[in-house]
Amino acid sequence: MKNIDKLIQKAEELQANGLVTRQIADELNVSRDTVTWLLTRSKKEEVPPAPKDISVNWSNIGTSAFRLRHIGIALCDMVLDSLEKAGTQAEVIVGIGLSGVPLASLMADELELELSVYHAYNEQSEEAQTRGAFSRNFASIKDKKCVIVDDVITTGSTMNDVIDHLRIAGAKPVAVAVLVDKSGSTSLSEVPVNSLVRIVRVD
């Protein structure tokens, strides 16, 4: 119960700072349904049943550049295996802002590849589809083979959106690399998913 209370408190703080449900979900590494449940529970309203979700806190890695670098090397190793099996190579590492960018930077350095950054934007309406853009301050992805990097896959919707945007921009997504995959996916939109931890719920 103590962990739930901490999540509720953090969700309330983030909401008070102007973040919308999707942004809170990204920050807490939980689904949007879980954020709604946390905020409803905090207001002591009639609370619906809790969604089946797992909160991921990887701050013990994120607070140490040394640990982060070694996790990045482990992800590189997994991605190289995946690319070898597929008989392809990568040219650009795409980090999803905010949490995927530090890992993507380390991986791009380790693999000696270019770095691109994707910013997921949130529409005013919660029902609206995520829109995003590739930062012009980083490498172009046009006609390039890309590895997409983030911290956690929750439902896969953000990752699928990035894959779609890459294809629309003329790039070819060849692999996904994440710390934790909560969706249990081995691939998303026909792109192999490489995760250090894959969570599979057995109900």
Image (cartoon, grey):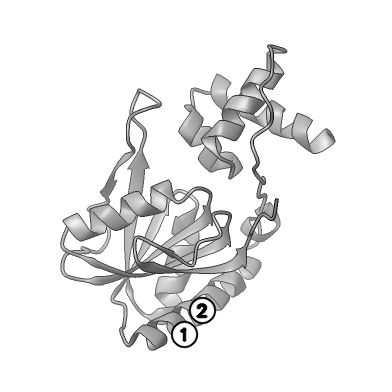
Residue 186 circle label: none
Left-right relation of 49 to 128: right
Which residue sits at x=66%, y=27%? 38
For label 1, the crowd category at 10 Å Cα-Cα, with few meaning under 14, some 14 to 19 and many 20 or more, is: few
Left-right relation of 115 to 27: left
Residue located beneath label 2 in the image:
78
Which residue sits at x=67%, y=52%? 59
Residue 97: x percent and y percent?
Answer: 41, 49
Identify the image quadrant of residue 132.
top left
SS at badge 2: helix
Q: CA distance from mark 2 to mark 1?
A: 5 Å
Which residue sits at x=69%, y=55%? 202
Task: Specify the amino acid type for callout 1.
Answer: Asp
State the residue in front, 190 or 132. 190
Residue 137 visible? The answer is no
Identify the image quadrant of residue 72.
bottom right
State the residue in front, 154 or 124. 154
Q: How many marks?
A: 2
Residue located beneath label 1 in the image:
81
Task: Specify the amino acid type for callout 2.
Answer: Met
Which residue sits at x=55%, y=23%? 15
SS at badge 1: helix
Residue 203: x percent and y percent?
Answer: 70, 50
The quadrant of the rendering that contains the N terminus is top right
Q: Determine contact: label 2, label 1, CB under 8 Å.
A: yes
Residue 28: x percent and y percent?
Answer: 60, 41
Identify the image quadrant of residue 168.
bottom left
State the residue in front, 57 or 154. 154
Q: Is residue 93 above or below residue 6?
A: below
Q: Is residue 197 above or below residue 51?
A: below
